[in-house]
Amino acid sequence: MAQRCLWELGTGVAFHAPEVFQDRNPHNLMRDFDDEVPGYLLNDKIAQILEATDLNAGSEHVSDNLHRCYEALIKNEILPAKEMLLVETWISDLNNIATQNSKNV
């Protein structure tokens, strides 16, 4: 999803060794693995759906593009509908932070 949105900014994703250590909270590694399997099995389908999703170029469209990607994956039953509330809340929080930062400049 990140890669698809970044294409509209004329950039992409790069992978390299970690730069930080994450002190993880206790969790079940087998459940984590089980949760990740569909992403691996449906990787080609996810890529096709995201490639076919109509997005807009430019940084002013990042939030809308992210929303559209989630809509497409929910519509195609890759992600559960309850994910949208989390995405919308996250986007709203980021917009609030940006507004507060612009007032403090």
Image: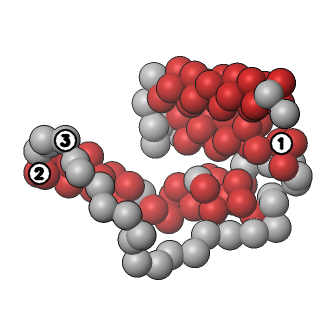
Q: Residue at x 59, y 38 (%)?
A: 70
Neighbour tally class for label 2: few under 14, some 14-19, many 20 plus, Cα within 10 Å: few
Q: Residue at x 43, y 30 (%)?
A: 80
Tell me the residue that label 3 is attached to.
25
On the image, the x and y values in percent for residue 1 come to: 59, 53
Which numbered disc, 3 or 1, marks the residue that appears first in the sequence? 3
Which numbered disc, 1 or 2, marks the residue that appears first in the sequence? 2
Rendered image quadrant of residue 71: top right
Which numbered disc, 3 or 2, marks the residue that appears first in the sequence? 3
Q: Residue at x 81, y 60 (%)?
A: 9
Q: Residue at x 83, y 24 (%)?
A: 103
Tell me the residue that label 2 is attached to.
30
The residue type indicated by label 3 comes to Asn
The residue type indicated by label 1 comes to His
Neighbour tally class for label 1: few under 14, some 14-19, many 20 plus, Cα within 10 Å: some
Neighbour tally class for label 3: few under 14, some 14-19, many 20 plus, Cα within 10 Å: few
From this viewpoint, which residue is outermost toward the bottom?
A: 16
Question: Depth check: 14 or 71 in front?
Answer: 14
Q: Is residue 103 left or right of residue 83?
A: right
Q: CA distance from mark 3 to mark 1?
A: 34 Å
Tag 3 and tag 1, C-beta contact below 8 Å: no
- The C terminus is located in which quarter? top right
Q: CA distance from mark 3 to mark 2?
A: 15 Å
